[in-house]
Image (cartoon, rainbow, N blue to C red):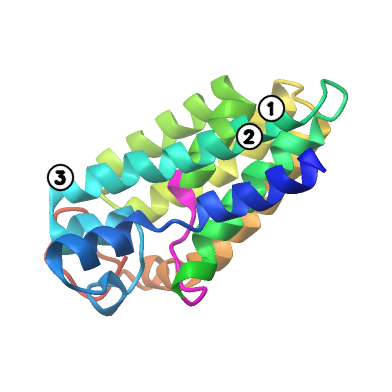
């Protein structure tokens, strides 16, 4: 019973979309109707500014942290799959939130929070790779893709539990599917760079 509740709570935590809420409550706009149309930290940064963007990023990371913590609380030490499933469900909630018509973000920040709880060192290294890539290229989407590409490799190299590895593979698929338009723009040289004027990108 506790496990079922933890899974549901994790989804509902993930489904709280801080980008949408900040836009609506503070600025009176639906963030999904501006910029790239994505309800996430990067679009918040571009549409609403640096402060709101950083705030949304931190809160989205904390959703992943909170969901895995809920799973840790509900599960016994032998049920290592439960925190992993809770982290996955928080990301599903972020991407497809029941509160907001199942139109959410792309899940990268929440992925970072969940994976940091499950495998801190591999996630830290993956984030460092992404930050370096963003600093050099100024493509946030490229950094996002590199995080989820690097994680399964790092988890294998560092011999982390199989349930965490397979979760990272699923998350990689999630992020690539959600970034498919960005991938096309990167390939065609039309993706917006961080700090550039908006060009309907994410």
* Corner quadrant of residue 166: top right
**Where is residue 22 shown, x and y percent of the image?**
24, 58
**Residue lying farthest to the front in this orientation:** 1
* Residue bearing the label numbered 2: 70
Q: Can see residue 193?
A: no
Q: Earlier in the sequence, mark 3 or mark 2?
A: 3
Numbered disc 1: secondary structure:
helix
Mark 2 is surrounded, within 10 Å at the Cα level, by few (under 14), some (14 to 19) or many (20 or more) other residues, namely: many
For the residues bearing labels 1 and 2, Cβ distance under 8 angstroms: yes
Q: Nearer the viewer, residue 146 or 95?
A: 95
Mark 1 is surrounded, within 10 Å at the Cα level, by few (under 14), some (14 to 19) or many (20 or more) other residues, namely: some
Give the answer, above or below, for where 66 lies relative to 157. below
Disc 1 to disc 2, how far (Cα)?
A: 5 Å
Left or right of 22 in this view: 145: right
Task: From the image, give the main secondary structure of the stretch colored magenta.
Answer: loop
**Where is residue 111 shown, x and y percent of the image?**
53, 44
Give the answer, above or below, for where 114 lies relative to 106. above
Disc 3 to disc 2, how far (Cα)?
A: 28 Å
Numbered disc 3: secondary structure:
helix
Q: Residue at x 78, y 48 (%)?
A: 4
Q: Which mark is residue 51?
A: 3
Disc 3 to disc 1, how far (Cα)?
A: 33 Å
Q: Which residue is drawn at 82% across and 20% down?
A: 77
Count of picture labels:
3
Residues drawn in magenta: 101-109
Q: Which of 27 and 104 is in front in this view?
A: 27
Q: Which mark is residue 12?
A: none
**Where is residue 124 shown, x and y percent of the image?**
48, 25
Numbered disc 2: secondary structure:
helix
Left or right of 30 in this view: 126: right
As for residue 43 lying within the magenta part, the answer is no
Q: Residue 73 carries which label?
A: 1
């Amino acid at each position: 019973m506790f496990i079922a509740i933890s899974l549901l709570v994790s989804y509902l935590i993930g489904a709280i979309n801080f980008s949408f809420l900040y836009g609506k409550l503070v600025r009176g706009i639906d963030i999904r109707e501006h910029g790239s149309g994505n309800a996430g930290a990067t679009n918040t940064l571009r549409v609403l500014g640096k402060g709101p963007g950083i705030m949304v990023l931190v809160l989205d990371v904390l959703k992943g942290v909170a969901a895995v913590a809920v799973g840790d609380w509900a599960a016994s030490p032998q049920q290592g799959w439960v925190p992993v499933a809770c982290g996955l469900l928080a990301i599903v909630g972020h991407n497809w939130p029941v509160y907001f018509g199942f139109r959410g973000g792309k899940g990268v920040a929440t992925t970072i929070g969940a994976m940091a709880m499950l495998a801190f060192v591999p996630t830290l290294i993956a984030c460092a790779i992404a930050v370096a890539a963003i600093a050099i290229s100024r493509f946030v989407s490229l950094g996002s893709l590199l995080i989820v590409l690097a994680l399964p490799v790092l988890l294998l190299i560092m011999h982390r539990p199989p349930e965490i590895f397979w979760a990272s593979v699923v998350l990689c698929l999630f992020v690539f599917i959600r970034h498919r338009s960005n991938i096309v723009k990167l390939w065609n040289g039309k993706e917006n760079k961080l700090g550039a004027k908006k060009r309907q990108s994410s």
